[in-house]
Amino acid sequence: MSNQNSTPQGWGYGQTGQPGYGKPFQRPFSHPDQQPPAFGGPQPYNPYATPQPYGQDQGQGRRRTSKRKAQRKTGLRFAGGFLAVIWAVFILEFFFPWLQAFGIHPLDPSGLPFIVTSPLLHANLEHIVSNSLPGALFAYLVGYSGKRVFWEVTTLVVVIGGLGTWLLGGVGTNHIGASGLVYGWLTYLIVRGFFNRSLNQILTGVTLGFFYSGLIYGVLPGTEGVSWQAHLFGAVGGFIAGMMITSDDPPELVAKKQAKALEKQARRQG
């Protein structure tokens, strides 16, 4: 009489010595979550394990979202700060009209420090209104790239634009207004993508160049009372900023530059 409870050899309890046999629960596919990977391959699928790659993707998505929020906040702070400062100074000019004397006086050595104060002053309401909206927009877009980028670009535009106006603005004139700064920010936003090899920045620059193409006439002489020198040299400062500044490089370009630097270092050591 045969024993129906006995298990044939080779079915997990016998002594065949074949891989996966001879031990309970070691048969192939019996418990895939406990089977070691064959030939050092990837770990088998475990339906009960935590989906780590998916979690990592979620974490990266959250970081990208939080980074964009921080960038938007930074851009809004600079845009709001720009408007708050120029309008506060404009209100002060009602009570202290002599403040307009702190503009750029070409070829006057005593007026060189006024390169910094000139962009804060405006002649009248029409003057400040014309600079407010585009200035706030460009300040936001530059500030979106970060605080360091904003201050580097702004410093170059103010210094280069101010010095150019001081040299060629015409003796006996007084240049005030944020329009030179506006032209510098716009030029930087248009050209930076070509130097950074960033498609998003190029598309942004092309869009801005299309909508604000009419500003090109502001760099040409001929309109009385308009400081075309400040516009022209402000734009020159923005172009130089787009060419020189590296703090706004996209991560892909930073990685390429680091790889090239390491390759050069390895060649020197080799």
Image (cartoon, helix red, strand yellow):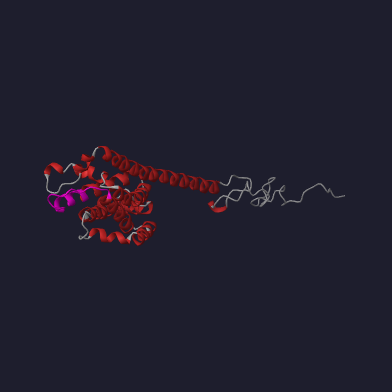
Q: Nearer the viewer, residue 205 or 209?
A: 209
Tell which residue pokes out farthest to the right in this image. 1
Q: Is residue 96 magenta?
A: no
Quarter-wise, where is residue 80 in the image? top left
Q: How far across and how far down the image is residue 36, in percent? A: 59, 48
What is the magenta range? 161-178
For image coordinates 45% across by 45% down, the residue present is 69
Q: How far across and how far down the image is residue 215, in percent? A: 29, 59
Q: Tally the numbered discs.
A: 0
Q: Nearer the viewer, residue 21 or 15?
A: 21
Whether 256 is drawn above or below 81: the answer is below
Q: Nearer the viewer, residue 87 or 234?
A: 87
Q: How far across and how far down the image is residue 189, in percent? A: 33, 54
Does residue 71 appear left or right of residue 213 in this picture?
right
Q: Nearer the viewer, residue 74 or 4?
A: 74
For image coordinates 33% across by 44% down, the residue present is 82
Q: Is residue 166 magenta?
A: yes
For image coordinates 69% across by 46% down, the residue present is 25
Quarter-wise, where is residue 91 in the image? top left
Q: How far across and how far down the image is residue 72, in percent? A: 42, 46
Does residue 245 appear left or right of residue 57 in this picture?
left
